[in-house]
Image (cartoon, helix red, strand yellow):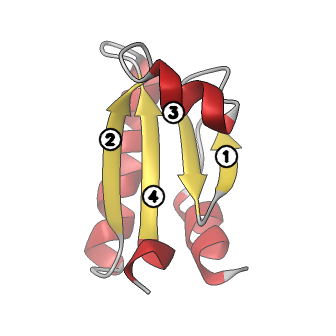
């Protein structure tokens, strides 16, 4: 199922930690081409933010599981493999 490999990335423009997570996501996509990333501005997507209980940036939804803060490549790959 295509959605199994989707990561939703909630970020805020100019957020240094968000930029760091963005680089990690690029590395994961290079290693796992089946992964898709939807980048959403935390401020302009309040409906989704509230629906998923996102309270901070950066935040990720990986296979429906929330992850916040600076997440490592290894943790992302593990989250994609689980569930």
SS for tag 4? strand
Q: Which mark is residue 67?
A: 1
Residue located 58% across and 74% down the image = 80
Q: Earlier in the sequence, mark 2 or mark 1?
A: 2
The image's mark for residue 48 is 3
Mark 4 or 3, closer to the camera: 3
**Helix or strand or loop: what does disc 2 sit on?**
strand
As measured in the structure, the alpha-carbon distance from the residue carrying label 4 to the one carrying label 2 is: 8 Å
Q: In the visual, does 28 lie left or right of 57?
A: left
Q: Residue at x 26, y 72 (%)?
A: 30
Find residue 24 and report its horizontal and vertical position in percent.
Answer: 41, 52
Q: Residues within 10 Å of mark 2 (few under 14, many from 20)?
A: some
Q: What is the spatial separation of the Cα atoms under label 4 and label 3, in whole angstroms?
A: 14 Å
Q: Label 4: which residue?
A: 7
For residue 5, side relative to residue 30 (left or right)? right
Taking the view exactly as shown, the residue that stands out farthest to the bottom is 1
């Amino acid at each position: 199922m295509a959605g199994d490999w989707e990561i939703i990335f909630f970020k805020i423009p100019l957020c240094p930690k968000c930029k760091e997570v963005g680089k990690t996501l690029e590395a994961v996509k290079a290693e796992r081409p089946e992964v898709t990333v939807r980048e959403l501005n935390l401020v302009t997507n309040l409906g989704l933010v509230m629906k998923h209980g996102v309270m901070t940036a950066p935040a990720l939804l990986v296979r429906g599981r929330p992850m916040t803060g600076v997440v490592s490549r290894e943790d992302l790959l593990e989250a994609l493999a689980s569930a």
